[in-house]
Amino acid sequence: MRDPDTIQSVATTQPHSVSWRWLWLRRPDTPALALLLGGLGLRLWLLLRGWPSLDSDEAVIGLMGRHILYNGERPIFYYGQHYMGALDAYLAALFFWLLGPNQMALRLAMLVLVAPFLVCVYLLGRAAYGRMVGLLTLGALAFGPAFGLMREAPAIGGYQDTLLFGALLALIAYHRLRAPAAITPRARWASAAQYAAFGLIAGLGVWSDELILISIFASLLALALGRTRELLSWSALAAVTIGFLIGAAPFLFFNLSHHGQTFVELSWQESSGHLSLGQLMSQIGATLSIGIPATFGSPQVCVAPRALYAGYTSYPTSAVRQVALSACQGMNLANMLFALAILAVYGAAIWPLLRVGWRATRMRLSALNRDQIAIHDAGVTTESGPPESPVLPTRAADSEQAARLWLRCMLILVALGTVAQYALSRRTIGPDEFVAVRYLLPLYITLPVVIGALWEAFAAGWPRRRSLGADPAWMRAGLRAGLAGGALALLLAFFLAGGVQAAVTASDSSRFALPAMPDQQVMAKLRDLGITAYYGDYWTCYNLVFESGERLHCSSYPKYERYAAYAIYLSHVQHPAYLMLVGSVGGRIFEQTTAPRLYRAGYVRTDVGGIAIYYLPTHA
């Protein structure tokens, strides 16, 4: 029977523990809630303005949602791309059922993913560095930067899924690392449920976009080192495996029945041979001058002419210059220094973790050595399981601190892995040098590290700056605090300035509105000309089909059809029209090669909204 004092202690401490654990649900952090609602309000306003503009990449997801809802189709991957899962299309179908198949419903479906990501990144910042860092991180990502706002809004490529799932994996791993060892049956069931959720999210992430692999690896590595015995127990392994098989079931089923088609297509993208030293240096240069600066809100980046196309033309014109490299050397140098400063902050954040890990490892090895000597002297033999991490303490307070350190390690590993993968990717340079920046979006999961490291450096020197005297240590601490505070203020200003740039761009009624004005002009012209079926380049095809509710029929020209049914339909049209972007490379080639043959057959050309329409008049 329990001692009455023990019972009273449990009765008085348990409600406090529960209320502390669920504080953010029962009594929301008012500043965090205000920042979250403000960020969602900004995104909703941008959505209503039609910013960024709809392009064919996003329209394909919309068309898949229509076909799921109205045609009973059940796609596993994007049309024509068997390495990105159709999860967003199913979510879009749900919103189409509620609100009708339109651009607003399509983007509201993505907002459902972005909102919990913002909550997760606040929790990550608070867990890793404290409440203030959580608030600063939430504020930065809620209102900027321009590139983040532009890529988080449309349904393209599963990037919202990657951000949300990556943040959730880190949070689950953090919770397991800070939780006490599961001793009671109830605790074991709770632990198994968390590991099952981890596996489910990891499986869904792999199906959605392989960018999640870096987050999965970082989280599993932290658990393997921090909770070795727990992770290797049969219950945890079974829970993770079952959860993963359920989440990745569509991915696994498709590849088992199609001979690994996903891996074949991914290998095609990187099958151009080994990188030369010059190519590697160019890609590292593009990463430092364009990739990292644009991701972290540089006020302006320089890209090659015509590097912005499709929805990327919506990027604020004040934030990007399309000029030759030789004409923008000063700006590129400034952006490289900015990128190197960001990488230096990650390095500064990991250095104390390495020292703690080394010190803890030495202490652990020393303790094991003493235990072995004592056992040997006593003449006792034992058999023990795999040792736990040397960083994992036994006391609750120490466990909380260790989990915080492990979380920082996870986020830094995700950051370094993401940058390394991007710098080595062949899509980093060339015509896609700006649009490829989207592969750095997982860095937003790791933003708490950058803000947290700068905040800690600023806060550590702040009390000393108020001391009197000319102590050199005080002066050095004050200097470090001033530099860290200035860098943090500048970084936050960059993020917020990007939000302002996006809002100013979206307020331009001549370019942005719902429904999309340029596309409406083209569709009105097609209606006047009696055109319902046409061939078009990729960027003039699917967006018009989606916006017309599939009253228009299009097949991509030349021979890059995402959806076979469209190609079959157009093959039976006797005199289809042709739509090409005016001034594009494809448009110029079409005018020189195919257009002369069409002119001889009686076709004529008319331009509207930046689109060249080649058609056969009805009287011909």
Image (spheres, grey):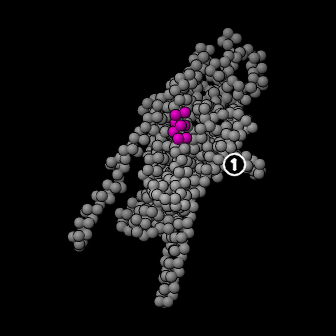
Give the farthest residue toward the left: 4
Task: Identify the residue under disc 1.
Answer: 284
Percent from the top left, x then y, of residue 256? 60, 51
Camera-side residue: 619 or 360?
Answer: 360
Q: Amino acid at mark 1?
A: Ile
x 46%, y 34%: residue: 42
In the picture, the quarter occupied by the C terminus is top right
Quarter where residue 15 is shown: bottom left
Percent from the top left, x then y, of residue 37? 41, 39
Percent from the top left, x then y, of residue 110? 49, 38
x 49%, y 82%: residue: 371
Give the farthest residue toward the top: 619
Count residues near mark 1 (Cα–Cα under 10 Å), then give few for <14, some for 14-19, many for 20+: many
x 74%, y 19%: residue: 598
Q: Is residue 497 shown in magenta?
A: yes
In the structure shown, which secondary structural element does the residue marked by tag 1 occupy?
Answer: helix
Percent from the top left, x then y, of residue 298? 59, 41
Q: What is the tally of numbered marks visible in this picture?
A: 1
Which SS type dominates the magenta stretch?
A: helix
In the image, taking residue 334 as reference, residue 12 lies left or right, namely: left
- Whether residue 264 is visible, yes or no, is no
Q: Is residue 111 shown in magenta?
A: no
In the picture, the quarter occupied by the N terminus is bottom left
Please report the bounds of the magenta region as a residue range. Answer: 493-501
Quarter where residue 413 is shown: bottom right
